[in-house]
Amino acid sequence: MANQTIITAEALANLQKELEELKVVKRKEIAEKIKVARSFGDLSENSEYDEAKNEQAIIEGRIAELEAQLKDVQILDESEFSNENVHVGSQVKLRQKGTKTVRTFKIVGSTESDPVNGKISDESPVGHAVIGHKEGDVVEVELPNGFVTYVIEKISK
């Protein structure tokens, strides 16, 4: 199951809410915009119509994307995991070897990734490198600007 998406129950609820909003609210709004734009007459030179149709295509694309993601999800049950090894759902405190720089990350599935807020994907270079390791392990990560070595200082939920 290479295309299976791993998400938390919270992320599942957020995706379902977004999908519902797009299907129920946004589709109606776009249909109304198209209806109004059609009433302006000649569709060949009608920028409002073109804009509404483009917006409709974007929304329909996002709906298809969300439906595909939700079709094959694995909900992460964090209670099933221990803090012995790093896994999706772990919060990991990493110290860059040779420095005092410490960073804390939550390892999440790719759909929940939000690096600005400390949530990194299990598919990212750092996330992928630390999966399966224990506290005290030294992990070398290949980043676009070179290699960085981290020490796993703490694993928590």
Image (cartoon, helix red, strand yellow):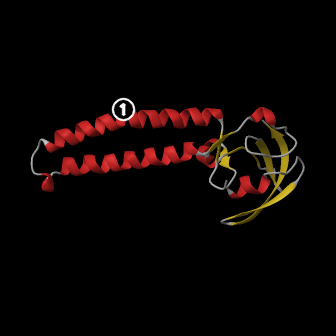
In the picture provided, is 58 more to the left or to the right than 50?
right
> How many numbered discs sit on the rendered protein?
1
The residue to which callout 1 is attached is 25
Residue at 52% across, 48% down: 68
Residue 5 rendering spot, x and y as whole percentages: 63, 47
Question: Which of 104/6 is in front?
Answer: 6
Q: Residues within 10 Å of mark 1 (few under 14, many from 20)?
A: few
Question: Which residue is outermost to the right?
Answer: 136
**Type of residue at label 1?**
Val
Residue 17 rendering spot, x and y as whole percentages: 50, 32
Residue 44 rendering spot, x and y as whole percentages: 14, 56
Question: Which residue is outermost to the left?
Answer: 41
Residue at 36% across, 32% down: 25
Question: Which of 62/95 is in front?
Answer: 62
Residue 61 rendering spot, x and y as whole percentages: 41, 50
Give SS at disc 1.
helix
Question: On the rendered image, what quadrant is the C terminus found in?
Answer: top right
In the picture provided, is 20 more to the left or to the right than 120?
left
Residue at 64% across, 33% down: 9
In the picture provided, is 141 more to the left or to the right than 20?
right
